[in-house]
Amino acid sequence: MSSDLPLSCATLPLIGVNACSQRLPEKHPFFIVGEKYVRAVSEGAGGMPLVIPALGDQIPLPQLVAQLDGLLLTGSPSNIEPHHYDGEPSAPDSEHDPSRDATTLPLVRAAVAAGVPVLGICRGFQEMNVALGGTLHQKVHEVPGYRDHREDKTTSINDQYNTLAHPVTLQPGGLLASIWPHEADVMVNSLHGQGVRDLAPGLQVEAIADDGLIEAFSVQQAKRFALAVQWHPEWQWHPDKGVGEFPFYRAILKAFGDACRERHAQRLATQQSGKQTTVGML
Ligand SMILES: N[C@@H](CCC(=O)NCCCC(=O)O)C(=O)O
């Protein structure tokens, strides 16, 4: 981002929020992103959201990640196509979004390699694992020993996301435990059918559900913040949430925002020193 922009823009970290590709009524194709994710970036992380369309390999990745101070990977009802992790073919009722897969999987790798802070949520959590070499259970509820992590679709959306469905235990000494040092077991919402089977090499478990399912991880060798959670902290910023306060969710977005601000400051300082060098040469 150029420092010629108005101060209000120039001082906010630019945070990418990936879109889904969907056909809305009348079958028109849209790139869409839930408002709660955009608001979580704006109000929770304190960034300037930049919606990233699901354009796959038409996106110039090096150019994009060089401009980004952060990347938030959204949730979605669709599932990653299993060929990306050598999984069995999907059940016929499984919803997919190949354009999103083609966009987010390379984007995760490029962002982590470039030191862009990343926060993955639900499908975004699953994408980070798959992008870095992990695999998924396609129906966690059919795997012996695991609970059903899906939402109760007979209740209202508010009830589904407000419900604290099960506890997760934070890994002592981990990134998430440093973000939330108040308690080791925290209750979270739960709205997913898929989940981590094999964790990708280089990922560090950050939280585990009471049935043993991995619910959060970080990227061990990442230059900056790279965290993914299976639950939905962005719910805190849903415009129709009504009453309900989730300090744990706020703490996650705040920590992500702090990392984005750090990268932003460093990018501006590098740009500034580049300009001074150029002026000195004139
Ligand atoms: N389809 C995957 C991922 C679930 C997920 O991301 N749900 C979010 C739904 C919509 C939203 O809140 O944005 C799975 O079922 O595991």
Image (cartoon, rainbow, N blue to C red):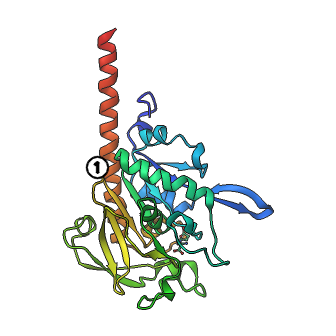
Of residue 32 and residue 111, the one placed in the foreground of this image is 111
Q: Answer above or below: position of 143 versus 237.
A: below
Q: Answer above or below: position of 175 versus 169.
A: above
Of residue 21 and residue 138, the one placed in the foreground of this image is 138
Instruction: Determine whether, in the image, residue 132 is placed left or right of residue 35.
Output: left
* Quadrant assignment, res 94: bottom right
Type of amino acid at the residue the image marks with label 1: Lys
Quadrant (top left, top right, bottom left, bottom right) of the N terminus: top left
Question: Horizontal and vertical percent for residue 256?
Answer: 34, 56
Can you identify the residue that label 1 sits on? 223
Give the total number of marks visible in the rendering: 1
Q: Answer above or below: position of 189 versus 144.
A: above
Instruction: Please name the residue shown 47% across and 69% down the image.
Output: 122
The answer to whether any part of residue 42 appears in the image is no
Instruction: Please name the residue shown 53% across and 63% down the image.
Output: 84
Of residue 38 and residue 95, the one placed in the foreground of this image is 95
Q: Label 1's element?
A: loop
